[in-house]
Image (cartoon, grey):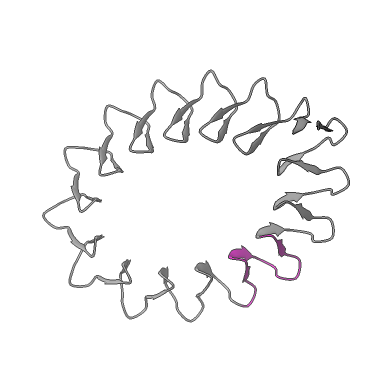
Amino acid sequence: MVAKEQTNSFDCCNGLLTTDTASFDCCNGLLTTDTASFDCCNGLLTTDTASFDCCNGLLTTDTASFDCCNGLLTTDTASFDCYNGLLTTDTASFDCYNGLLTTDTASVDCYNGLLTTDTASFDCYNGLLTNNTASFDCYNGLLTTDTASFDCYNGLLTTDTASFDCYNGLLTTDTASFDCYNGLLTTDTASFDCYNSLLTTDTVSLTVTTVY
């Protein structure tokens, strides 16, 4: 059995660090800075529980004029309707193509389930739209605007492959001063340590007692 004591000023909140355990609380894994005015709405923070409501997991700023349409917010429930789960502003002129809204089924087509406004100049690469296939390319499913200066490392975009590197899938801006400890970035490996895979800024107040 191992008994561990956490630092006084740091605590863990569902896997996220809180800098002040007195004013911080946990809201479905998200930090709230003021537990009096903050509430949780299906895992999303609401800044005003009086005017905010939840609409299938999406925040609505005015519960009187907002409604939910298959999980999408509609600003006017009188003029809005749902078509296959997508919002249409005019069900007479709107149609759906493969579950996506098309404003003109003659000129609009779908490519890999994404709308293209001009099938000649638009193409899809790994399911993402590129508006210029000559200058746009995809790397690991992310769009890069300039394939010469952009590169991907472990699926994350780096703007400068010379100064950027990845360590355990996280970007580090300076590989000399950055290191990773259990997959989390530490800015100073001398003063940083990990406690239950979470970063603590003060390793002096951390004690580990082993009881046999």
- Residue in the image at 46% along x and 36% along y: 43
Which quadrant: the C terminus?
Answer: top right
Q: Nearer the viewer, residue 89 or 161?
A: 161
Q: Quadrant of residue 168?
A: bottom right
In the image, 82 versus 104, the foreground residue is 82
Q: Residue at x 74, y 34 (%)?
A: 1
Residue 78 inside the magenta-drawn segment: no
Please name the residue shown 27% across and 27% down the image: 64
* Drawn side of residue 63 relative to residue 211, left or right: left
Which residue sits at x=79%, y=59%? 174
> Residue 85 in the image: x percent, y percent?
24, 50
Q: Which residues are magenta?
A: 148-168
In the image, is residue 89 above or below residue 145? above
Q: Quadrant of residue 211?
A: top right
The verdict on residue 161 being magenta is yes
Query: Residue 138's x, y, as percent?
Result: 51, 73
Residue that extends furthest to the front in the rendered view of this protein? 212
Q: In the rendered view, does 117 fall on the left or right side of 165?
A: left
Q: Is residue 84 left or right of residue 191?
A: left
147 in relation to 36, above or below: below
User: Which of 39 and 205 lies nearest the eye of the viewer?
Assistant: 205
